Image (cartoon, grey):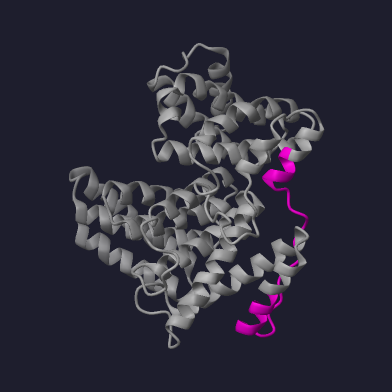
Amino acid sequence: MPNRRHARRTHRDAVKLAAAGNHQGALAVYAHAVGEFRGCLAVHPEDRGTRSDFAELLADLAASHAAVGEVAQAYAAQRERVSITAGLEAGPVERAAARLDLAEAAVGAGRLLTAATEADAALGLLDDVDPAAPASPGFTILADAIARAARVFARAADPDLAVGAADQAARMLIAARQAAPGGFGAEGIGLDGTSGLLRDSLRLAAALHAAAGRPAHAKGAADLLQRHFPGTEPPAAPIPLTLRAALETAMRMGAFFDPRLIDRLCPDPAGRDAPATISARCDPGLAAVALHTAEPAVDVLAPTHPNLAWRIATEVHYLLTAADRVGERNLHLNFRDHGPAWLAMLMALTATGKQGPILTDLAAALAELCDRLRTRHAAAEHEPMVLAANRFIAAHGDGAGR
């Protein structure tokens, strides 16, 4: 008979092994604890205490998987943890932390679509915190979250969004340091962790500003880096492919025809009000407008200019996901018009020749969208686009080949 007390004791034994650096040994013990917890939940599926303990175990399990390079398993554990945490109706700080952990695990596993959308969703859970008031409750927690999201966006989203987030995180973390000279306080992460996030934010800001040809901003970030972390240099970064650059290139090629929309979608990344989240880059109502303008361009560019197609399509997908999450009225009420175009835009990416885990993530996004189309009666299951999407999902989804 499964026993929660025994499961918790087994979990503690695994944590001790992991703390000693024996992650392989820890994983074997974690497996026993997972079996115990699943057995307990099979008998009492709604027991909140067991579910909370299991979510904590999954976080530790993911850390050990990541430590030995098992990135897909780490991602799967964090995915399940987020699902359980959401079901517990946990507080926003706990849910934001779980979603950021998932975003970082998704980056490690090459699941970049999930990474960006989860990081943005995590920041949305903290939107009641005042980012301009260092003494306000939750300020350091929000600064921490933005810094972590900046690292995710640098790998999975528009570099202009990453640099905006890195700049804001650095400003906030420096303000927190000045407000509490003896440390960052008890509300956030520890001093060492916060210092690491400040260092990473300044390094990222300096690198991205330099790569984008903004030497004054790059020097400002580099000077702050030297002041707070003497001897630390920013990394070199390749010239970034931003959403603005992708859209402007598409316009020059005759595949995109709305220059005013570019300015609305792509605020100045070096401005004081540069968006730090996907949700903040434009009004949610603009997402559907961007979709119908960008979808034909993605379709044209996908076979011959795959990087441009991926940048445009993913950023619009992120905007749509953010708008849908906040219940944007037009997107919801007129989904019969918007949903098929959304599906077509993502399906165009299947012709770009990409390989690897990103295709599994694309299949997951397509599966979710197809399910939404079906439940909202926006497309029939026998329609050619849906059939093609289902074939791609069967070939590349998480269950493919099993």
Picture layout, residue 377 above or below residue 126? above
What percent of the width, then of the height, locates residue 338?
51, 24
What percent of the width, then of the height, locates residue 296?
67, 24
Residue at 53% x, 12% y is: 383
**In this image, 314 relative to 144: left or right?**
right
Can the viewer see residue 150?
yes
Does the segment drawn in magenta span residue 233? yes
User: Which region is colored magenta?
Assistant: 222-247
**In this image, 392 relative to 245: left or right?**
left
What percent of the width, then of the height, locates residue 389?
56, 23
Name the outermost residue toward the bottom.
182
Residue at 43% x, 88% y is: 182
Name the outermost residue toward the front.
260
**Image quarter of residue 123:** bottom left
Picture layout, residue 192 above or below residue 148? below
What percent of the width, then of the height, locates residue 369?
48, 29
